[in-house]
Image (cartoon, rainbow, N blue to C red):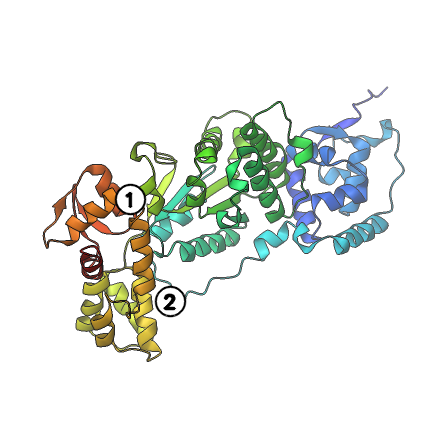
């Protein structure tokens, strides 16, 4: 006599992958499958985690995907003759119902759109700054990676971020992008509100339904609830690695009420992926890319820099003269080495300032000599950029005094380490040890004039 087996079974890793493949092929979300198969989201979540679930639920789920139970469960474990047969749902009806459900859903409800909607970036004027791109592309392939891209404003962080998003899609990874510029001041003033907003935005980016009510428990701290929401819901729903880009993170750093806790939360996720316990595999799916401007450092305690010592850090360098000449050619300008030297002597290899110069000349709005002559004045093409730097600097009279001493002489000036670090982070100086000199001639000319009054 044959022995009766358990009514619950477990999908194999290959079976889970088969479900994911069919789901993507048919452009079904897990929610749509659950509704069509009449199974709970918790059951689907346990199935995709490799937990045991009821056989009847398996039958209904595979019918939606036009699969057989033995496509996802080991044949020797699946023994239907000893089980009470559930009424077999009509597969074509279920698929039609699923399609109808998708039609009624917001287009963002398909997690496939997260990958497929990333447009190939325009590389016409993109300058590779090796080994920056290689480091970034390699980093997102590391399980549980945390990559931090930092530079002053207008150094090309956005263009690099677009390259990383595109590279992630080429690897078949899931992607999600969040700019903290979208967060209002009220969201950024309270940790619980902020983390709920953070979870809700990423959920929407992944095309999933908001499940915060089910996972947010008042007895637990907000950081713990956020971790559980990511671990048991968001990351459990996807099979491919997730590249999550957090842009303009310096906006979070500005708000002391949430900054430290949020940084500790991100650190803890990075640490969990390396612990080697059961949860590590889930967290290894996540590859965090944190992008931030460094100007905020001027207002922070130098000894409490956010995320210090965590993950892989990329600083964006300036363009070399060879890169500037190549960029000029791409703008249709037949510049020789002398003309390249004129512009780099003025602005160094600052990406935004170089591009701005080339665009003005390309469209015949100004000649190079005109740009050089008016550069440090209010009528020059760099006036908005310079005024923004002055506004940032004037937030600290201590830094105003320090930088005033730097631009007043042709020789490098010794500064206190904290002053040197903050002026460098603002993009105003180059450092030689603790000695500083203006980053470029343009800055010396402009600030020597405006700080002398």
Residue 192 coordinates in the image, percent (x, y): 57, 33
Spot occupied by residue 421 in the image (x, y as percentages of width and height):
25, 41
Instruction: Say which mark, if any, is on residue 396.
Output: 1
Residue 54 vertical placement versus 101 (above, below) = above
Closer to us: 85 or 119: 119
Which-is-in-front pick, marks 1 and 2?
1
Q: Residue furthest bottom?
A: 364
Q: Residue at x 22, y 68 (%)?
A: 343
Quadrant (top left, top right, bottom left, bottom right) of the C terminus? bottom left
186 or 110, which lies in front? 186
Residue 159 in view of the camera? yes
Q: Which residue is pictured at 56% across the width and 27% down the height?
A: 224
Q: Quick check: 182 left or right of 161?
A: right
Percent x, y of residue 30: 70, 43
Residue at the (75%, 38%) spot, across then down = 70
Q: Residue at x 30, y 65 (%)?
A: 382
Left or right of 323, for residue 51: right
- Could you tell me residue 272's position as x and y percent? 49, 29
Of marks 1 and 2, which one's residue comes earlier in the chain?
Answer: 2
What label does residue 125 carry, if any? Answer: 2
Tell me the distance, in whole angstroms, between the alpha carbons under discs 1 and 2.
36 Å
What's the mark number on residue 295?
none
Front residue of 259/320: it is 259
Say few, some or many: other residues with alpha carbon within 10 Å of mark 2 (under 14 / 14 to 19 / 20 or more). Answer: some
* The quadrant where residue 279 appears: top right
């Amino acid at each position: 006599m044959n022995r009766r087996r358990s009514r619950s079974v477990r999908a194999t890793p290959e079976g889970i992958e088969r479900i994911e493949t069919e789901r993507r092929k048919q452009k079904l979300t897990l929610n749509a499958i659950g509704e069509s198969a009449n199974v709970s989201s918790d059951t689907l979540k346990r199935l995709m985690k490799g937990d045991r679930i009821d056989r009847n639920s398996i039958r209904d789920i595979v019918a939606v995907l036009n699969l057989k139970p033995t496509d996802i469960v080991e044949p020797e474990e699946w023994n239907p003759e000893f089980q009470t047969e559930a009424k077999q749902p009509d597969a074509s009806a279920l698929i039609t119902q699923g399609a109808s459900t998708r039609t009624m859903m917001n287009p963002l409800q398909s997690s496939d759109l997260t990958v497929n909607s990333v447009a190939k970036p325009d590389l016409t004027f993109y300058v590779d700054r090796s080994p920056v791109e290689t480091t970034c592309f390699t980093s997102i392939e590391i399980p549980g990676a945390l990559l931090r891209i930092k530079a002053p404003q207008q150094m090309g962080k956005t263009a690099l971020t677009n390259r990383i998003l595109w590279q992630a899609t080429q690897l078949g990874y899931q992607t999600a992008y969040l700019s903290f510029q979208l967060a209002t001041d009220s969201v950024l003033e309270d940790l619980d509100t902020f983390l709920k907003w953070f979870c809700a935005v990423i959920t929407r980016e992944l095309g999933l339904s908001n499940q915060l009510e089910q996972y947010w428990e008042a007895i637990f701290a907000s950081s713990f609830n956020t971790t559980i929401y990511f671990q048991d819901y968001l990351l459990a729903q996807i099979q491919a690695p997730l590249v999550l880009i957090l842009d303009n993170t310096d906006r979070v750093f500005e708000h002391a009420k949430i900054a430290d806790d949020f940084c500790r939360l991100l650190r803890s996720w990075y640490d969990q992926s390396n612990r080697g316990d059961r949860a590590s595999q889930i967290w290894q799916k996540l590859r965090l890319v944190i992008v931030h401007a460094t100007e905020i450092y001027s207002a922070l305690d130098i000894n409490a820099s956010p995320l210090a010592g965590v993950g892989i850090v990329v600083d964006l360098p300036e363009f070399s003269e060879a890169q500037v000449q190549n960029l000029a050619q791409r703008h249709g300008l037949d510049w020789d080495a002398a003309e390249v030297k004129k512009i780099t002597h003025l602005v160094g290899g600052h990406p935004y300032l170089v591009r701005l110069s080339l665009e003005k000349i390309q469209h015949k709005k100004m000649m190079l000599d005109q740009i050089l002559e008016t550069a440090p004045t209010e009528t020059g093409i760099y006036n908005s950029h310079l005024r923004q730097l002055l506004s940032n600097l004037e937030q600290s009279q201590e830094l105003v005094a320090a930088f005033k001493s730097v631009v007043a002489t042709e020789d490098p000036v010794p500064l206190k380490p904290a002053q040197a670090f903050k002026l460098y982070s603002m993009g105003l100086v180059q450092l030689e040890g603790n000695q500083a000199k203006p980053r470029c001639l343009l800055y010396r000319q402009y600030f020597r004039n405006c700080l002398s009054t």
